[in-house]
């Protein structure tokens, strides 16, 4: 089913009343010396948190004022060329500020580019479609004051592969990123991406709807020139924590832990060959495997890696999977699945912002694209020398992952309002950047 992806974000935005055009001073500030600049519409956007009236001016430009990167101009809905569209914020008596500058050049070789804008109380929603053989649809919801991306729901699929469609939901404030993909066993899955179920916003499960699987994506945040994590450093609020109580993860074995016993696991990627994993487990110090017992019964991390060459990420056979186990001492174990090179593990301990001792495990693979086929992380909490519960970023059935999502990578070159960025505090703690 082809997915437009604008419904969840736009439901709260009723038709926006049009306002009078900006006054002469505002128009001059917006247009400057651009002679083709025209204020097309002005939308009511409610009030700012400080109580100032807000509106958004939609500006149209002629070909003569097209962006420098556009050779011919930007495409209009009726197939003509112009200089693109700009959205400007009018915030009380403040000077107008540019929000978005849009130039539909086809947005990819397929030439299917399209934009749609909706404005509501202190909100702007931008829907965009484009691509070539790989098609994408993206709906981003922004707050106007302050100007920043709040959420993003995107679809990516190949136009000759029915099973390639993946829908990803990003919360920029928390960096909780979830995605759903089609069950690879479906006989007629249809082209495009699976629709995001309304139920998933209330209760996210490993199988949000029949025929689809859900998972939490690992994140590679932008960090500018900051070090990834210095010796003695901790992850802090850089990425959200998965807990064995079932927060930001699925308890796939045993019962969720009580708050006092819950383990907390934070993971971030640096590229597609390194994972940094931070573990706080209040039960771990008292656990050890029975003499001659398996590592399975010790507190440990499991990493599942996918190796499908056709970019399928669900219900992979063991020949396309590798399971790696790492205990909290940094020892590495080969689990089930295909043979492959195990990661090198660097282990250290540190004290987090709450004064707790945490274990840092840095997993480094030789192949810099080792994780390109999808990856999931599981933590096993032990009690009395036995595996008590498993919490996972993906569903696990019969000791097999249902879906191995891609790493969600952010880049410093992305617009500042859409960065999933972390910064390094003095003392070495990585925190989410505002």
Image (cartoon, rainbow, N blue to C red):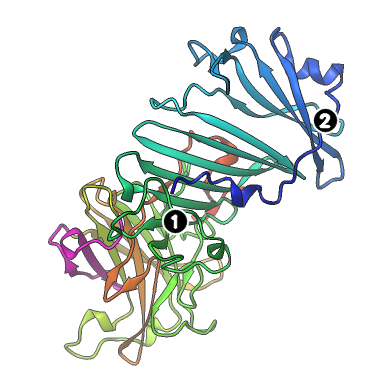
Q: Earlier in the sequence, mark 2 or mark 1?
A: 2
Q: Residue furthest front?
A: 188
Q: Give left or right: position of 407 versus 352.
A: left
- Name which quarter of the figure residue 21 lies in: top right
Q: Nearer the viewer, mark 2 or mark 1?
A: 1
- Residue 400 screen position, x and y as percent: 27, 70
Residue 12 locus on image (x, y percent): 70, 51
Q: For the residue labelled by badge 2, is the local secondary structure a helix, a strand or a loop?
A: loop
| 61 vs 406: above or below | above
User: Residue shown at 55%/35% (left/top)?
Assistant: 415
Q: Residue at x 20, y 63 (%)?
A: 317
Q: Residue furthest bottom?
A: 384
Q: Position of residue 361 (x, y in %)?
A: 34, 64
> In the displayed structure, would residue 355 be above or below residue 239?
below
Instruction: Evaluate whether residue 42 shows in this view.
Output: yes
Residue sitting at 39 percent across and 27 percent down? 110
Q: Quadrant of residue 389?
A: bottom left
**Front-most of residues 307 and 173:** 307
Tell which residue pokes out farthest to the left in this image: 339
Q: Is residue 30 magenta?
A: no
Label 2 – label 1 distance at C-alpha? 39 Å
CA neighbours of label 1 inside 10 A, class few (<14), some (14 to 19), many (20+): many
The range drawn in magenta is 313-341
Residue topped by disc 2: 94
Residue drawn at x 29%, y 73% is 329
Tell me, yes or no, whether the highlighted magenta stretch contains residue 336: yes
**Horizontal and vertical percent position of residue 373:** 27, 51
* Residues tagged 2 and 1 counted as in contact (Cβ below 8 A): no
| Within-10-Å neighbours for mark 2: few <14, some 14–19, many 20+ | few
**Circle 1: element type:** strand
Is 367 located above or below residue 79 in the figure? below
Where is mark 1, residue-wise?
A: 179
């Amino acid at each position: 089913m082809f997915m437009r992806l604008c419904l969840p974000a736009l439901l709260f935005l009723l038709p926006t009343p049009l306002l009078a055009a900006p006054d002469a001073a505002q128009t001059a500030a917006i247009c400057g010396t651009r002679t083709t600049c025209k204020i097309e519409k002005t939308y009511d956007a409610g009030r700012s948190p400080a109580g100032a009236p807000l509106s958004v001016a939609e500006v149209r430009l002629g070909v003569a004022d097209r962006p420098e990167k556009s050779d011919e101009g930007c495409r209009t809905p009726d197939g003509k060329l112009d200089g693109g569209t700009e959205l400007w914020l009018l915030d009380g008596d403040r000077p107008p500020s540019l929000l978005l500058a849009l130039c539909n050049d086809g947005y990819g070789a397929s030439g299917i580019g399209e934009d749609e804008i909706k404005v509501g109380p202190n909100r702007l929603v931008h829907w965009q479609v484009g691509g070539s053989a790989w098609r994408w649809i993206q709906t981003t919801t922004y707050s106007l004051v302050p100007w920043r991306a709040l959420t993003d729901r995107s679809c990516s699929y190949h136009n000759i592969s029915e099973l390639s469609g993946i829908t990803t939901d990003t919360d920029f404030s928390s960096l909780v990123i979830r995605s759903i993909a089609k069950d690879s066993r479906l006989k007629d899955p249809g082209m495009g991406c699976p629709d995001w179920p309304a139920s998933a916003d209330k209760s996210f499960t490993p199988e949000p709807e029949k025929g689809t699987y859900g998972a939490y994506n690992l994140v590679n945040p932008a960090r500018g020139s900051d070090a990834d994590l210095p010796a003695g450093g901790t992850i802090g609020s850089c990425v959200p924590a998965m807990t064995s109580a079932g927060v930001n993860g699925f308890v796939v074995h045993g019962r969720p832990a009580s708050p006092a016993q819950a383990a907390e696991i934070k993971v971030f990627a640096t590229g597609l060959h390194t994972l940094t994993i931070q573990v706080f487990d209040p039960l771990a110090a008292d656990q050890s495997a029975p003499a001659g017992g398996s590592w399975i019964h010790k507190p440990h991390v499991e990493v599942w890696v996918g190796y499908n060459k056709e970019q399928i990420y669900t219900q992979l056979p063991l020949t396309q999977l590798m399971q790696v186990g790492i205990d909290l001492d940094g020892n590495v174990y080969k689990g089930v699945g295909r043979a492959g090179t195990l990661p090198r593990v660097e282990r250290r301990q540190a004290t987090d912002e709450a004064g707790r001792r945490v274990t840092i495990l840095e997993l480094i693979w030789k192949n810099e694209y080792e994780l390109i086929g999808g990856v999931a992380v599981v933590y096993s909490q032990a009690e009395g020398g036995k595996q008590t519960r498993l919490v996972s970023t993906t569903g696990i059935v019969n000791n097999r992952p249902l879906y191995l999502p891609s790493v969600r990578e952010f880049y410093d070159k992305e617009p500042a309002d859409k960065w999933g960025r972390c910064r390094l505090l003095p003392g070495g703690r990585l925190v989410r950047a505002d």
